[in-house]
Amino acid sequence: MLLRDYVFWKQGIPPHICDQILKYGTQLKSESGKIGTATGTTKKDVRDSQISWVNAKWIWDWILDPVRRANESIFKYNINEVEDAQFTKYTAGQFYDWHVDIKEDEPDNIAKNYCRKLSIIIPLSDPSEYEGGNIEFRSLHCSPDGKYAPPLISKDEFKEKGTLLIFPSIIWHRVKPVTKGTRYSLVAWWGGPFFT
């Protein structure tokens, strides 16, 4: 398994497409973000956001090729399935604490030998429209005692509208609390057979 923390492209998704996704996403029925399985539980002390599920081919047309290229040239994971994307809204005080996206221990995923392998985050808001809401990662590179080595990975570029951020779904990450305004993003996952 390749131990690469992330790749990103500034304006990997053009601003006018982000605006179209934002307009589309705000018209969808939303629900509270959950943890665990798709039917999971709401735990506001871990995750506080509003989400909508997105399955629109025109959106995937913008995402699939760069993710495929990143996987073929950098990560080299066996990937054969794309999940519905998630349109996410964070307002002041909302956040998503430390978590991983892999979901390898869910009964449905065990039955079909599936886990998430690559996570994709695309900020849809201009960073001038909100404060806080930074994305932070723990590095894949661990110390000998198994604890994650500092420093945390957090870059201002991760907040730029249309940045295409791709990282292994096994990486611990979080969204810090938004302190002002509204942060919108699109999150997606690619998966395949369990890592061996």
Image (cartoon, helix red, strand yellow):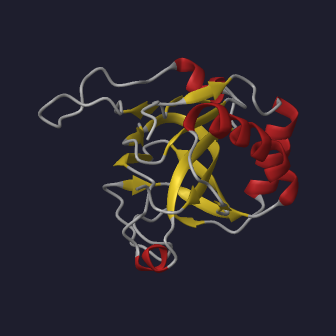
Q: Position of residue 44 (x, y in %)?
A: 36, 59
Q: Residue sitting at 45 percent across and 30 percent down?
A: 5
Q: Nearer the viewer, residue 123 or 133?
A: 123
Q: Residue sitting at 71 percent across and 42 percent down?
A: 68
Quarter of the picture holding the N terminus:
top left
**Residue 97 higher or lower than 50, as above or below:** above
**Residue 156 higher or lower than 104, as above or below:** above
Q: Residue sitting at 75 percent across and 29 percent down?
A: 12
Q: Is residue 181 left or right of residue 23?
A: left
Q: Is residue 52 left or right of residue 110?
A: right
Quarter of the picture holding the C terminus:
bottom left
Q: Is residue 171 left or right of residue 7?
A: left
**Residue 7 higher or lower than 59, as above or below:** above
**Residue 123 falls in which quadrant of the image?**
top right
Q: Position of residue 150 (x, y in %)?
A: 26, 22
Q: Position of residue 63 (x, y in %)?
A: 76, 44
Q: Position of residue 87 (x, y in %)?
A: 66, 54
Q: Nearer the viewer, residue 194 or 126?
A: 194
